[in-house]
Each structure stands twice: as structure tokens, then as C-alpha cells.
Image (cartoon, rainbow, N blue to C red):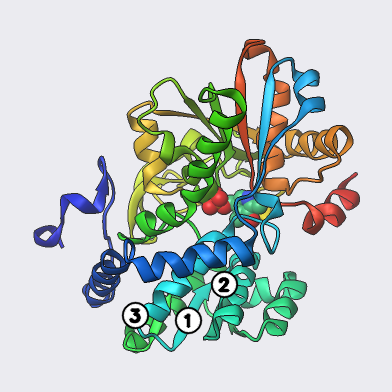
Amino acid sequence: MKSKDQKKWYFGEFGGRFVPETLYSCLDELEKNYFRYYKNEKFLKLLNSFLTSYVGRPTPLYFAKELSSYCGFKIYLKREDLCHTGAHKINNAIGQVLLAKFMGKKRIIAETGAGQHGVATATACAVLGIKCEIYMGEEDVKRQALNVYRMNLLGANVLSVSSGSKTLKDAINECLRDWVSNVKDTFYVIGSVVGPFPYPLIVRNFQSVIGEETKRQILKYEKRLPDYLIACVGGGSNAIGLFHPFFYNKNVKMIGVEAAGKGINTNMHAATLAKGKVGILHGMKTYVLTDDNGQVTPTHSISAGLDYPAVGPEHSYYKSINRAEYVFADDETAILGFELLSKLEGIIPALEPAHAIGWLIKNKKKFHPKDIVVLSLSGRGDKDVEIVKNIL
Ligand SMILES: *Cc1c(COP(=O)(O)O)cnc(C)c1O
């Protein structure tokens, strides 16, 4: 593996391609074709037309007047909750499925835990007319019956995985096995900025539309760049999508908010960058939540989308060079954000960005009255209303 290791696969020391030899040709083919098409005029024209007329882009950058006066400084919300399907995941799903079509693939596979990435992928496959199979652990199929039904409605076939712990980890293994054996006609869609190179790069670039639009919008409204960008971090795709286009704007500070679950001193959280160690998981070198024996530990968060024991390698890099700061918010803080944004702005947020909102509210004293903050409202909260109702 060492001899093939290439610098371009890394973000600083993070990322890479830590996979069995058999996967190299799949990843090489993907890399070659991604760079063949990503600036191709026909590809971009089609992608942009789907983003505009189907996903609903550009999404608004909304000045949250009530939340701003509550906190004492200006807060703008980047409204990814208004994307078709209700979250940012569709930006990436449409991009990858379109790339698959340009590559002449006839079949899409993906894995999903809670089902959100599965639904986004099934949606993209429906509208682009390509066969879709989603791997899901047997336990998750039971727990997420409604999302399984959604995927079926969208024409996807959900494959229940009954090996191992019957959850996401096992679904990923099955999916990789499928990809290796069927790579000629099959494309594997990954849902966040994770996995072996080139996935973290591809997903980041498809999600960077969030930050690119934000930049144009805030310059129009405020005639200057924001002081802070804030986003929740699961795998890290909505956050890096917002952050990346501002990487070289050194005065723009970035804050990623991880899920602290029941608290970072319990073993029920998903605060990878706060409590994890550098290790290897899902084909990448990055921060991973492990126990003293190096075993990946189970995670907990009130929000399924943040419940992941690793993080995209580019975030590990941003942390290592202090380009972004990573903080955490527990379940209770997320519920605070969920309730307060609903009441103040009439926007029910998904529990994932509710972590960022709750963190901001609890830390409002740290900001200056002249500060301008842009917060990524990565998804809408309809899916979470029942969860919160049952807790309270
Ligand atoms: C999946 C999801 C997330 C977490 O994924 P990232 O890759 O970290 O963005 C955050 N918010 C919503 C609404 C999601 O559906």
C-alpha cells in the first residue's frame, strides 16, 4: 500500500486510501472520471439545471431577525432545509448520480444507517432514471421502517444486511463487496465527506455550492464577508460545503459543532474531534472514536445524522492547522435550539443543525454586537418532531 500512497490523496496528513488492493482499480476509475467531467461544460450545465429547477437552488440566505436580537449580533441562516427532500444531502446525491450516468453506469448502490442518505440517493436515481439498490443493516431496516418505505416508493430496492451487528458498519462492508464484484456497471454513492480518496474531495466539491452561494449572498446583503461560519458536523459535508469556499479568507472564522449526546465524559456521544484519536476507519486516516484497545466505540446522538464514530479527513486537517475550531453540544442543547428557533423564527430545524443553534445560543456572550454569523441550517425538522415530542 505504501508504494502507491500519493500526496494528492491527503488533506495534510489526513485522508488517503486505506483499502484492500481489490478496491484500487474502482477508486482509480472514479478519480479519473471525476476529473474528466467535473469541469466539463455539458456535465456542469446539466448539474446546474437540476440544482436550480429540481433541488431549488440557490437556497435563501435568511437574516434571522428575531434570533439575532435574542443573541445580540447578526445571524444569517443558510436555508438548506428548503432543498427538495429537506436537507443538503441531495446536492451531493444528484452530483454523484449524474457523474455515474456520464460514466455510463447502469446501477447505483449506497449504504445508509438512519436512511437519510438512502432517501436522497433514491430520489436522485428516480429523477435521473437509473436503477438503485440501498444496503441497510437489518436492525436499521426495523428502526427506520418509514424511510425504507420512502425508498421503496422512490423505486429503490432496499437490501437488508443480517451479518455482524446488523447496522451501518455491516451495510458498508456489503456495499463495498458489491462494488468490487460489479464495478463495470455499478457506481457507489457515498453520503458524506468520508471514505477513501477521491470521495472526500468529490462530496466536498458537490457541497461547496452552499459556501459559494453564501459568499455571493452575504456580499450583496452586508457588503462584507461574515465573521463566523457555524455548522454541525456528522461526517462533515454540510460544514465543509459551507467552509471550503472561505478557506483563504483568513478573517472568516469557522466553528464546527459535534454531537456530545449525553455528555463527552460519558460513552454516549459522537464528539469525534473533541474526544477521538487519529486512526483509520472506512478507508481514511482521520479522527476516530476508539476505546483503549483501539476498537471503534458505539456512538450516541439524539440526531441520527450526527451519530458517526469518525469525521471527514478535511475536518481533521482544518483542526490540525487551527483553521476551524470544533466544539460540541449535547442532546439537551440541541433540543433548546430546536425549540427556540421554532418559536423565534417559525422554522423547525432538523436536530442536526439544532446542535449548532443551541451551541450558538448558549455561547452568545462570546460574540461581539458587530459580529455577523452565518449558520448552516442543514435540514428541516419534520422528521424529528415526534422524537422530540416523545422525549419532552
Ligand atoms: C445527514 C445530515 C447531517 C450530517 O451530515 P454531514 O455530512 O455532517 O453534513 C446534518 N444535517 C442534516 C439535516 C442531515 O440530514
Task: Report x, y in % for residue 285.
Answer: 32, 50
Quarter of the image where the C terminus is located: top right
Image quadrant in which you'd find residue 276: top left
The residue carrying mark 3 is: 103
Q: Of tags 1 and 3, which is closer to the observer?
A: 3
Task: Report x, y in % for residue 133.
Answer: 54, 84
Tell me the element at label 1.
strand
Q: Residue placed at 28% from the left, 66% from the top?
A: 19
Precedes in sequence: disc 1 or disc 2: 1
50, above or below 296, in the image: below
Tell me the element at label 3.
loop
The 10 Å Cα crowd at callout 1, few under 14, some 14 to 19, many 20 or more, is: many
Compute the Cα span from label 1 to label 3.
Answer: 12 Å
Viewer-proximal residue among 80 and 233: 80
Compute the Cα span from label 2 to label 3.
Answer: 17 Å
Q: For the residue marked with disc 3, what is the amino acid?
A: Met
Task: Report x, y in % for residue 252.
Answer: 47, 24
The residue carrying mark 2 is: 121
Precedes in sequence: disc 1 or disc 3: 3
> Are circles 1 and 3 on residues that touch, CB within 8 Å?
no
Quarter of the image where the N terminus is located: bottom left
Q: Residue placed at 26% from the left, 40% from the top?
A: 12
> Are circles 1 and 2 on residues that touch, CB within 8 Å?
yes
Left or right: residue 4 compared with residue 113? left
Compute the Cα span from label 1 to label 2.
Answer: 8 Å
- Residue farthest left in this picture: 3
The residue carrying mark 1 is: 108
